[in-house]
Amino acid sequence: MRMIIKNGTVIDGFGSEVKADILINYGIIKAIDKNIEISDAVVIDAAGKYVLPGFVDMHTHLRQPGFEEKETIKTGTEAAAAGGYTTVACMPNTNPTIDNEIVVEYVKSIAQREGVVKVLPIGAMTKGMKGEEITEMAKLKKAGAVALSDDGFPIMSAGLMKRIMTYGKMYDLLMITHCEDKTLSGEGVMNSGVISTMIGLKGIPREAEEVMLARNIILAKSTGVRIHIAHISTKGSVELIREAKEKGVKITAEVTPHNLTLTDEAVYNYDTNTKAYPPLRTREDIEALIEGLKDGTIDAIATDHAPHTKDDKKVPYDMAAFGISGLETAFSVINTFLVQTGKITIKELVNYMSINPANILGISSGIKVGKTADIVIVDPYEEYVVDKDKFKSKGKNTPFHGMKLKGVVEYTIVEGQIKYARDRKIEKIEV
């Protein structure tokens, strides 16, 4: 099975940007050159389009097993492909929790049978994510867990967290931490500030994130573990991570598309689709987050894709579930608000959404002869209006519904196989 991607502008993830054709043979990139001509090959015309390394999401909630009414591995990976993602790392807050090798193997087997893109399980730090008993890390790693995290259930005990990090260092496991001091966030549902006061909603202070982040940085420095900070949202967090990197702490960080583009003013009309954790912050925070990306303090853009049912969101704001369905809008949101406005370049987008997250997770990425053909083809200039009812994901909970965005995914190719083709049915594409 051979494929040629013709006439596209190839950004390979290694610094090169060139108009060229790409020859793919049985899932492997065989040539990158001008005017490749070969018989018996599927031809994709990418004229006027960018050909990029497939996106890698470090923070996806696929919900299966246990919460299939919200999402399944099948629907979640279909959404990922529609968003240009060729690999997703799924969080362990399932039922049962991904806290042992049996559940890791289960997720991998379902992904193998029903998944559309590659799925990398993230194991839990503690059994049941209860913050009490440490999981058997060696068995989780051997089964295929690429990192450990208790996701939205922060380890409140510093002593326990230090032991977790010590063992994590021993097994060379990446620790992904949700930084939140529950005693500070309390029953808050949005950013604590002028807006929360005006509309009468309980606020989540920035200190809830920053205090826990500072503690985890100290422990990471002490133990020498590799630590990754999930979905940071405040200017103070950027400053803490920047300082930690300067001091040699093995730390990386991610930020979400919604925290890079929306402020707490979006909560004015009580739209529960704006409710996420961490909450939407202020314009000053957004500017600091973008600067953090630009100077290398923040390494990756991750979706924190958190699909929910309509019933989860169709309630008063205080009672609604936290989370945004983000896989299918991530590229266009970042392209619209950051690339098209000149805040970052398309090459930097590739680094934040593909190369850097892949490097952090220890997997391969980039377009190069001899590499696996995990590729996304995008049109960065075409506009469309977000329609949640057209999402592949079961989760329709997006604050971007009805918004005009610029940039569409045309094709997503995983290991040389077309997994998403815009406005076409995959089964009709002969590959």
Image: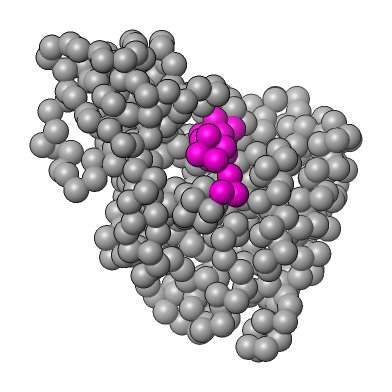
Residue 89: in sight, yes or no?
A: no
Q: How would you classify the magenta stretch by its main secondary structure?
A: helix
Along the line of sight, which residue is nearer the eye, 291 or 72?
Answer: 291
For image coordinates 18% across by 38% down, the residue present is 426
Along the line of sight, which residue is nearer the eye, 96 or 271?
Answer: 271
State the quadrant of the C terminus.
top left
Occupied quadrant, residue 47: top left
State the quadrant of the N terminus.
top left
Query: Is the residue 326 above or below the residue 141 in the image?
Result: below
Question: Is residue 231 shown left or right of residue 43?
Answer: right
Residue 336 percent across, percent down from the top left? 47, 54
Residue 327 percent across, percent down from the top left? 43, 51
Query: Is the residue 57 above or below the residue 185 in the image?
Result: above
User: Number of marks in the image?
Assistant: 0
For image coordinates 55% across by 71% down, the residue present is 275
For image coordinates 55% across by 75% down, the residue present is 266
Query: Is the residue 218 above or below the residue 366 in the image?
Result: below
What segment is highlighted magenta in the picture?
342-357
Question: Is residue 30 shown left or right of residue 196?
Answer: left
